[in-house]
Amino acid sequence: MPEITMTLRDFTMKLTLRTIVSAASVLNIDFTMKVTLRTIVSAASALNIIFSVCQIALTCSIFDFVVMNGMFYAMPNKNILIPTKWSYFSYSFSMVNMLLCLWSLHRISDNSSLGYEQLVKWQRMRQVAVSIWHLLCLTASAGAALYLCIQFSILAQSVGVYAENSEPKAFQDAANWYYVRLCAQSVLFGCSAFLSLISFCVQNNCSEFQRKDEKHSCSYPRTQC
């Protein structure tokens, strides 16, 4: 009888230990995944800010005195090769995109938005509304960046026609100079669109994690990306 009691006790202890180890491993996986997702969003936002600064610098370089005064055109019909309206679109997008990335970093680092299990209903609704608005802004930013990427690619193509075998030589050199910068600007807009989509997808993933966590615990605040 004592041997049976000892065997049953050992079995219970082993089962308890295995349960604890399994639970700890699951919690560790969830924690690691959350930290990884937050790191991805932070890296994407920081890189997007750098790209926005580069976009502003390139916009200043492309839309210089010559372009802004309509002096860069093709003969004989004096067709303007780089319309000045794209400078306003480029400046506006770069600034708004930078602010949106700073908002993403703020939402990750701000402790007041990390969890709201104990908050009243209207505060939770406000937090959800802010999250939805943030995701919509990311979607709009990605769409605008993709649109500008296409438009600057078209501009680069129209200018690139005159980058070789054009007369006079000064016009050919100027066309080549603008062509390189328009291509670089198009690539930067494409990268911004890609990074905005990454932030959108990863933050949606974070929301799924949070909804799963709610089912397990209501006494501890959850971590929000």
Image (cartoon, rainbow, N blue to C red):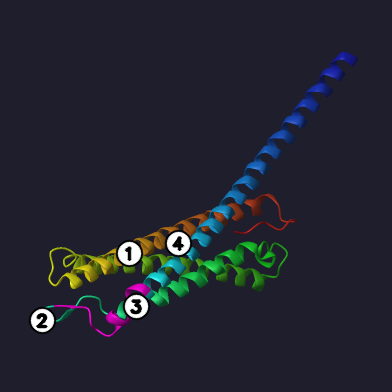
Q: Amino acid at mark 3?
A: Ser
Query: In whole angstroms, how far apart are the C-alphas of marks 2 and 1?
Result: 27 Å
Picture residue at 63% right of the left edge, 45% below the top: 32
- Above or below residue 25? Residue 91 is below
Q: Which residue is under mark 1?
A: 186
Work out whether residue 38 or residue 121 is closer to the camera in this orientation and state it. Answer: 38
Q: Nearer the viewer, mark 1 or mark 4?
A: 1
**Where does the magenta region start and end?**
61-74
Specify the label residue 77 is tagged with: 2
Q: Which residue is mark 4?
A: 196
The residue sitting at 33% across, 78% down in the picture is: 64
The mark lying in front, picked from 2 and 1, is 2
Identify residue type, mark 1.
Ser
**Image quadrant assignment for residue 72:** bottom left
- Sequence-first disc among 1 and 3: 3
- Is any part of residue 132 visible from this angle? no
Q: Which residue is mark 3?
A: 87
Does label 2 or label 3 sit earlier along the sequence? 2
Quadrant of residue 18 within the rendered picture: top right
- At which x and y percent is residue 135? 49, 65
Amino acid tagged 4: Ser
